[in-house]
Image (cartoon, grey):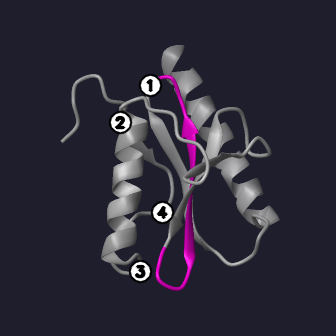
Amino acid sequence: MASLGDKPLVWLKGEVKTPPFSNQARLEAGLLLRRLQQGQGLSLPHSRPMPAIGRQCHELRISDRDQTWRIIYHVAPDAIVILDVFSKKTQATPVQIVEVCQKRLAAYMRAISDKEHT
């Protein structure tokens, strides 16, 4: 249950559910996202900055039985914005994931800016 001071999660893409996440991986993702909502900063091994996507962008790293999940997120002043959720199969984040996350973040920022000016 979120507290009054917690930042909401804004899901632009993806979800964390069982399946495909195992129960354990889903719980770990939920706990880490909750910590972010409460304003706690995360670092390795749980989270890594993703400056190629944008400022305040990071990836959560969730180990599962036979795969590793990534949750790409942006820490906005008033929300935690989920840009994508995917199973990572290579060491480097695929270029197409980076590009689509950049586009989603730009669209989100435009929408927020437009909302503030209306």
Quote the CA–CA distance across marks 1 and 4.
Answer: 20 Å
Tag 2 near tag 1, CB within 8 Å: yes
Q: Measured from the top left, where is residue 38 in percent x and y?
A: 36, 32
Between 116 and 71, the residue placed more toward the observer is: 71
Q: In the orientation shown, which residue stands out farthest toward the top?
A: 117
Disc marking residue 8: 2
Taking 49 as reference, is 97 above or below it?
below
Q: Residues within 10 Å of mark 1 (few under 14, many from 20)?
A: few
Give the residue type that dot 1 points to.
Asp
Quote the CA–CA distance across marks 2 and 1.
Answer: 7 Å
Q: Measured from the top left, where is residue 118 in percent x and y?
A: 49, 15
Quote the CA–CA distance across marks 1 and 3.
Answer: 29 Å
Give the residue type that dot 4 points to.
Gly
Disc marking residue 20: 3
The residue singled out by tag 1 in the image is: 78
Give the residue type that dot 2 points to.
Pro
N-term mark: 1 or 3: 3
Relative side of 90 to 12, left or right: right
Whether 98 is among the magenta residues is no
Disc marking residue 14: 4
Residue 37 shows in the view: yes
